[in-house]
Image (cartoon, rainbow, N blue to C red):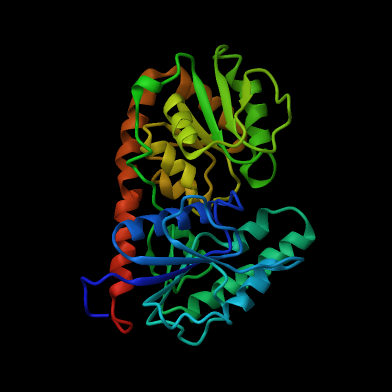
Amino acid sequence: MTDQGRPLRIAMISYYLPSGSKIGVGYQVHELATELVRRGHHVDVFSECPPVEGAVYGHHRIHLSGRMRTFRFALELRKVDFSSYDVVHAHGDDYWLWRRRAARHIRTIHGSCFEEAIHIKGFGEKLRMLALGFSEMLASVVADETVVVSPRTRRWTPWVRRVIPNGVDTGRFRPDDAQRASSPTLLFVGTWHNRKRGADLARAFQRDVLPTVPDARLEMVCRDAPADPGPGIHVLGELTDAQLVEAYQRAWAFCLPSDYEGFGIPYAEAMACGLPVVATPNVGARYVTDDGHAGVLAPLERIGVALGEVLSDTDKRSELSRLGSERARLFSLDRVVSEYESLYRREPDA
């Protein structure tokens, strides 16, 4: 692949896509594939999910039903002929592709299933995550080159040296002061249950924020919240892409108190929109906020107090907004795709 100017044929592998899952990997694959097509490349996405409405890239669905679909998806990929592609770029489930299927085989590890196994509830789910963790390790050996989305993800694959973060379309995710709400507004994007800890944030908001900022409101982009989550809390449900941008632009601050994120795309989206970010010190939040230099990191039991302080201090919000916006440039989709393009075109022994 010495012809640096010609368009590439890229096969992108992801079990998840926004059409069938709210997992962040699927959204990132959709964004990467869309931008690569915009740059003139041919991209086909191989997924268990149906095609995304309006997608500009090709789509090959691998139909599955029943149990253990993520593992069976990997086996089905062995039946696919990738020989017509210049690049196979996998975002999971390529651990059985040990024989070279294309000129370049790239693997992105978006987090660590071993880390998730530590935090996830249920013995069966822990076993599944452990099995997926070993598959991630195997995939990092099978691929010509493996990248991680944050430095601390390397804890479980220390032989992987290259870091390419997730990307955010800063043309869409950008500040708009004219949209800012008149009352102090916090935004959460995630789930009520499990590792996103929306329920914990709701309790902290009512316990620690409302007594000090009585007119504050918490808007939650969340599909599994109860019908009546409590005073000051407004559940927005599932939003379109445009509505999500509006929610960021409307808010005064953003909070996602996850117990684990490999990266945490909502942190980067919020920062790109000029929002101060308050988070628990998980792996992804520490990286995206530059270890708290461009955001506020607090343990879960202090998250409500930290939010109250941010909402009450105009100067602090302005400084966090400035620092976060500067940090967000590192995560621009344009920059990330350029890094992948360079990686795609490297000689295998380079």
295 displayed left or right of 75:
left
Nearer to the camera, 279 or 104: 104
Up/down of 189 relative to 20, above or below: above
Picture coordinates of residue 242, whole percent (x, y): 45, 35
322 displayed left or right of 295:
left
Whether residue 294 is visible:
no
Picture coordinates of residue 270, whole percent (x, y): 43, 37
Q: Which quarter of the image is occupied by the N terminus?
A: bottom left
98 displayed left or right of 313:
right
Up/down of 323 relative to 6, above or below: above
Picture coordinates of residue 338, whole percent (x, y): 29, 60
Up/down of 72 relative to 259, above or below: below
Which residue is found at the position 60% from the left and 46% from the top? 259
Whether residue 268 is visible:
yes
Nearer to the camera, 165 or 205: 165
Up/down of 304 relative to 222, above or below: above
